Image (spheres, helix red, strand yellow):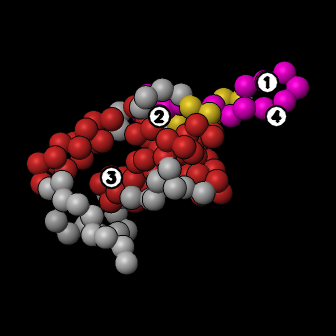
Amino acid sequence: MTTSHSAFCPVYRAIGVLQEKWVLHIVRALLDGEKGFNELARAVGGCNSATLTQRLEHLEHLDLIRKRTEDTHGKLARSVYTLTPAGKELQAVIVAIDSWAREHLLDEPQPALT
C-alpha cells in the first residue's frame, strides 16, 4: 500500500502516535484503572520521570488520558491519570497485539548478557 505523505492517512498517523516509546505501556497500565504518577511509573517500569511526563502530556493533548489533581491536605498535590473513552478503545489494539504475540512469538529464553 503506497501512501503519499502529503495526504492524511489515519493509519500512518496512528502508528506515529502509538510507536512512541512507552505510549502503549502507559495505556496498558491505565487499563487497570486510574493511577498516580509514581504508581504509573512503577507499572510502566524503566521510563524516566522526564520522559513519562512528556508522554503523559502528549497523551493528554491527544485526549487519550485525563489528568486530575488531588488535594492532599497540605502535602504536594497528587496527579492522577485515567484513560478517556478514546484511550479505553485502545484496549482492542493491545488485545490484538497480545493475541498476535501468543500466536507468533515463541516464549524463548533471552540470551545471557556477558
Mark-to-mark CA distance, 4 and 1: 7 Å
Residue shown at the point (65%, 57%) measured from the top left: 50
Q: Is residue 35 above or below residue 62?
A: above
Q: Residue 74 colored magenta?
A: yes
Q: Which residues are magenta?
A: 70-86
Which tag, 2 or 3, sits closer to the chain's start? 3
Asked if one can make out residue 57 in the rendered structure from this viewpoint, the answer is yes
Which tag, 1 or 3, sits closer to the chain's start? 3
Q: Disc 1 designates what residue?
A: 72
Residue shown at the point (41%, 32%) measured from the top left: 31
Mark-to-mark CA distance, 1 and 3: 41 Å
Q: Amino acid at mark 4?
A: Leu
Q: Contact, CB < 8 Å: mark 4 with mark 1?
A: yes
Q: Is residue 38 above or below residue 73?
A: below
Mark-to-mark CA distance, 2 and 3: 24 Å
Location of residue 55 in the rendering, given as x and y in whole percent from the top left corner: 56, 52
Look at discs 2 and 3 and give the one toward the viewer: 2
Instruction: Give the quadrant of the C terminus.
Output: bottom left
Q: Amino acid at mark 1?
A: Thr
Residue shown at the point (48%, 26%) measured from the top left: 33
Which tag, 1 or 2, sits closer to the chain's start? 2
43 displayed left or right of 93: right
Mark-to-mark CA distance, 3 and 4: 40 Å
Which tag, 2 or 4, sits closer to the chain's start? 2
Residue shown at the point (27%, 69%) measured from the top left: 111
Location of residue 86 in the rendering, given as x and y in whole percent from the top left corner: 42, 33
Residue 76 disc label: 4
Instruction: Give the quadrant of the N terminus.
Output: bottom left
Q: Which element type, helix, strand or loop, lies under badge 3?
A: helix
